[in-house]
Amino acid sequence: TWAARRWAPVIGFVDRPDATRKLHGREVPLLGGAAVLGGILLTILAAYLFNRPQLGEPRQAISELVPILISAVAFCVLGLIDDRVGMRARTKFLGQILCSLPFALLGAQVESIELLGNHLSFEGWGWVFTLFWLVACSNVVNLIDGMDGLASSIGMIAALSLSAATFLTGRLEVALLGLVLAGSLAGFLAHNWPPAKIFLGDAGSLTISFLLGAIAIQGAMKQTTGFTLAVPLVIISVPVFDTLMAILRRKLSGRGIGEADRCHIHHRLQDRGLNRRQALIVIVSLSSAMAASAVAAVYFDHDWIAICSCVAICCGLIAGRVFGHYETRLFFGHLHEMTGLVLDTSRQLPTRLLAARVKYVDRQEHGNLWDDACERVAKMGATQ
């Protein structure tokens, strides 16, 4: 990270303030993603070179992680291009798919998933779900990366909890990769804590998101029950919750999903009077609580522990009007209007159907219809 801070301005990787969204007062280096990935690669290289018999066979274990590392490097390169020249959303999305392919095709594939006792098998199409999962994960941390230290803190907590969860299931090499990622992020966080001296950039947030998703899949490879979906979702539930609320808010407000706003969870906390560090500590505490419940669910082999804890915390945030209250009201407001429209339509439907029958009735029935109409009107007291 020291090297990245020094060389980023030299090669033009800096984030310049624009007085609208980017409110930092000076240019900030933007090579944090390369620094984090560099720390991971150097540590794995050291483990490969300095082989120790008491560690088992680390070289064989590391060779199983090659597809992960190939995709991680590809994600970092994609993010660096976006940080340097900018990319359209569709181009970036296509790039995420291409970057996920090495791991989806050469590495672990999700052949089945399990959620709360329900089992779903993909019958040879596991690589499609793997690709979808990796692309989805690669955007989660990227969308919440709007405050100093936020993405790196959440990534570090998620990596530690995934490492603990995979250790409990016996995947030691995957647990070690999680620890390496957490250690690299911890070293970076020393420079990224508010006020940040270097930013992750898209290169960092995309790479971290992908690695978290890949570690979750790799850690479930030797489990007979398949990929347990609840645990990784709960571990990253804070950025997932923030992302879902952002999509809901922008869609129902008539804005584009990719259009930026200042309504994320860290913005809401600052609107309530917290400074940046206090808001960061609150979010880190929430993420830690979610991660602890997920690890407990793995330890006790009971997904409901993680699910109930996650739902309770999210509902508490909404009920306390900390975050998600506006989006929830907006959603139910739209739902109320749509329900009213359906009810009004159902009341008008019989009349419209009758009008259609009269309009398109056969010519031979015209006389019968006229006689029936005259009889009904006469019963109402009409004389002519």
Image: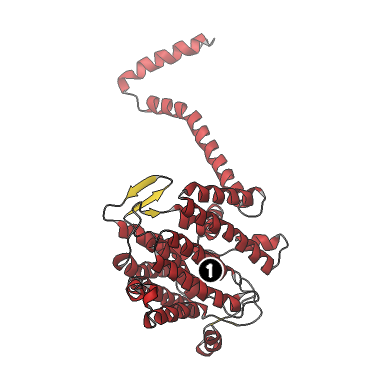
Q: Residue furthest bottom?
A: 10
Q: Is residue 108 left or right of residue 77?
A: left
Q: Is residue 246 visible?
A: no
Q: Residue furthest right?
A: 273
Residue highlighted by disc 1: 156
Neighbor class of circle 1 (other Cα within 10 Å; few <14, some 14-19, many 20+) is many
Q: Is residue 266 left or right of residue 342?
A: right
Residue at the image position 58 percent from the left and 75 percent from the top: 189
Element type where label 1 sits in the image: helix
Q: Residue 341 in the image: x percent, y percent?
A: 52, 37
Q: Is residue 189 left or right of residue 359?
A: right
Name which quarter of the figure residue 60 lies in. bottom left
Q: Residue 281 in the image: x percent, y percent?
A: 65, 65
Residue at the image position 31 percent from the left and 22 percent from the top: 363
Colour mode of the rendering: secondary structure
Q: In front here: 262 or 7?
A: 7
113 over 56 or under it: above or below:
above
Q: Is residue 16 visible?
A: yes
**Amino acid carrying mark 1 in the image:** Met
Q: Residue 368 in the image: x percent, y percent?
A: 36, 15
Residue at the image position 46 percent from the left and 52 percent from the top: 230
Q: Residue furthest front?
A: 54
